[in-house]
Image (cartoon, helix red, strand yellow):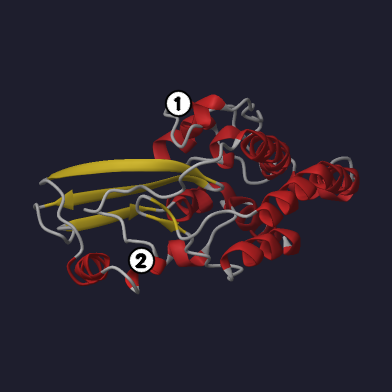
Amino acid sequence: REAIMDIFESLTGSRLTPSFMRIGGLAADIDGDFMAAVKSFTDTFADRVGDYETLLTANPIWRSRTKGVGVLTADECINLGVTGPMLRSAGNDWDIRKSHPYSSYEEFRFEIPTGRAGDVYDRYLVRIGEMRESAKIIRQVVDGLPAGPWRAKDARTVFPEKKELNTNIAALIRHFGLLMEGFKVPPGEVYHSIESPRGELGFYVVSDGGARPLRVKVRPPSFVNLQGLVRMIRGKLLSDAVAVIGAIDIVLAEVDR
């Protein structure tokens, strides 16, 4: 985790909230040092995952505290709207990166790890597999990333580069126009989702034709996945709840409503 945070900080200046993506591109171009750091990380990460498996996978204490604990079947997951590793640990291989590819995921080779039991142990195994697959995807991205523009040139939606602001009055006017007023989009509504580490992260946006959304609804995976907690711990030991909540892997900011 610290190695990943260091890589984020080297490129964006921030460790947890980089805010590096922009409408139409990125905040800045990616440099060679960043690419080298990512390559170095992917080269060593697989060995680290192997260390985690050596420590836990066959550990009798770990297995006794996780196998058969917090079971949620695939049908129960679907009925509750549970997605991500929790759904895949129950045997359903639903993954938005495969079913509805975005961001060029259709160009990468990767597998979808699945389990069968739908318990805490299988959720652990799925996440171990996903770490390996994520490293494979990242390496494919780094090796195949083409050179060229990193920001769109659409003046209606994209801020001009900062170096233009000191020499180009039109760029300065456009900058403040986008900053103060935003840009208008046609009336309508759209729902789009991505496969986040915890499951489906979706955004439903309604436009009335203005520069501000009429309505925005966020579908966070943690909030939805947590709905299965009562079913998973009913009749179990209180100590099992710790393992179950850990396997759900909630982010409290997503759960707060």
**Distance CA(mark 2)–CA(mark 1):** 41 Å
Side of 147 relative to 184 (left or right)? right
Q: Residue at x 62, y 55 (%)?
A: 31
Q: Residue at x 56, y 51 (%)?
A: 234
Side of 69 relative to 189 (left or right)? right
Amino acid at circle 1: Ser
Front position in the image: 228 or 44: 44
Is residue 18 shown above or below 216? below
Q: Nearer the viewer, mark 2 or mark 1?
A: 2
Q: Is residue 164 visible?
A: yes
Front position in the image: 50 or 168: 168
Q: Residue at x 48, y 37 (%)?
A: 77
Q: Residue at x 53, y 62 (%)?
A: 251
Amino acid at circle 2: Glu
Residue 171 point in image, percent of width and height: 26, 65
Which quadrant does the N terminus fall into? Answer: bottom right
Residue 76 point in image, percent of width and height: 47, 35
- Callout 2 secondary element: helix
- Residue 73's quadrant in the figure? top right
Which quadrant does the C terminus fall into? Answer: bottom left
> Mark 2: few, some, or many residues within 10 Å (few <14, many ≥20)?
few
The answer to which of marks 2 and 1 sits earlier in the sequence is 1
Front position in the image: 257 or 200: 200
- Callout 1 secondary element: helix
Would you name the residue on which mark 2 appears? 164
Q: Is residue 94 visible?
A: no
Would you name the residue on which mark 1 appears? 99
